[in-house]
Image (tube, helix red, strand yellow):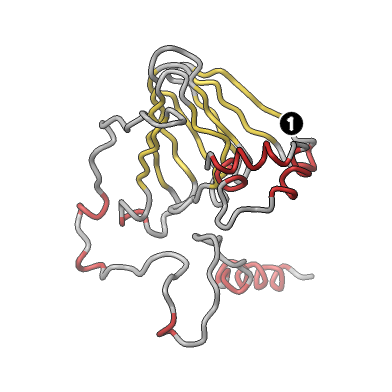
């Protein structure tokens, strides 16, 4: 191939990138196609505001200095700033959360189907970790974090945070999606509506059926 032909192909590849681009990442759990727009209830993202009407307030949100209420069964509270609460995040592929932990509180095992998470501890101590996929042998990666420490949870993998002390803890996390989604494992497995057949779960978790039924009543 001559230099002129190679240069022409190169220009073609950089000037029409969308011809080879893949589909955008989904921003919701599912989006069933409809032929009639009148039947559409959700879109994969948000409609855009007229640029002439955009103000600085569209990119501003206060309240991250306020602690969340941790008086619940898991002892934690997540305050999310995503595209639903901060419209300026639309199309930018990022969001932010504040997580407050009571003594011995936890953010239980969960996944973000659409985002990698970077967590930084602002106050206290946290025991954190994630589990790799089946193909990697379900390896557990854990670390004890103190104030100022940072930990990364890869996209889609099950992860958790636990406060092992008698003092409160606070962390902030950035996620690589304007709408990362969250699937709390215990809630999804034992609290689905309608409930998963206890026999299925008893086989999956190697538990007595009555134990599974008891767990389902807690969610």
In screen coordinates, is 132 left or right of 51?
Answer: right
Instruction: From the viewer's side, name the closer residue of 140 and 162.
Output: 162
Q: Residues within 10 Å of mark 1 (few under 14, many from 20)?
A: few
Who's the residue at 43% across and 70% down the image?
A: 42
Per the image, the residue denoted by label 1 is: 139
**Residue 136 location, quadrant:** top right
Q: Is residue 54 above or below residue 213?
A: below
Image quadrant in which the N terminus is located: bottom right
Residue 172 at x, y percent in the picture: 40, 32
Residue 179 at x, y percent in the picture: 45, 53
Who's the residue at 22% across and 62% down the image?
A: 54
Q: Is residue 219 above or below residue 125?
A: below
Circle 1: element type? loop
In screen coordinates, is 104 left or right of 156?
Answer: left
**Residue 40 location, quadrant:** bottom left
Residue 36 at x, y percent in the picture: 47, 87
């Amino acid at each position: 191939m001559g230099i002129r032909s190679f240069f022409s192909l190169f220009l073609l590849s950089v000037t029409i990138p969308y011809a080879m681009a893949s589909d955008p990442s989904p921003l919701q759990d599912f989006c069933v196609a409809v032929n009639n727009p009148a039947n559409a209830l959700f879109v994969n993202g948000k409609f855009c505001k007229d640029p002439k009407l955009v103000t600085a307030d569209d990119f501003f949100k206060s309240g991250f200095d306020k602690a969340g209420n941790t008086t619940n069964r898991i002892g934690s509270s997540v305050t999310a700033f995503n595209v639903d609460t901060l419209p300026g995040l639309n199309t930018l592929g990022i969001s932010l959360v504040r997580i407050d932990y009571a003594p011995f509180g936890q953010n239980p095992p969960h996944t973000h189907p659409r985002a990698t998470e970077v967590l930084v501890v602002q106050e206290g101590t946290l025991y954190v970790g994630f589990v790799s996929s089946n193909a990697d042998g379900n390896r557990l990666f854990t670390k004890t974090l103190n104030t100022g420490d940072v930990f990364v949870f890869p996209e889609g993998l099950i992860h958790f945070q636990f406060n092992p002390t008698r003092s409160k803890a606070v962390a902030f996390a950035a996620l690589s999606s304007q709408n990362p989604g969250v699937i709390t494992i215990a809630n999804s497995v034992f609290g689905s509506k309608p409930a998963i057949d206890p026999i299925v779960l008893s086989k999956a978790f190697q538990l007595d059926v009555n134990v599974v039924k008891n767990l389902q009543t807690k969610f």
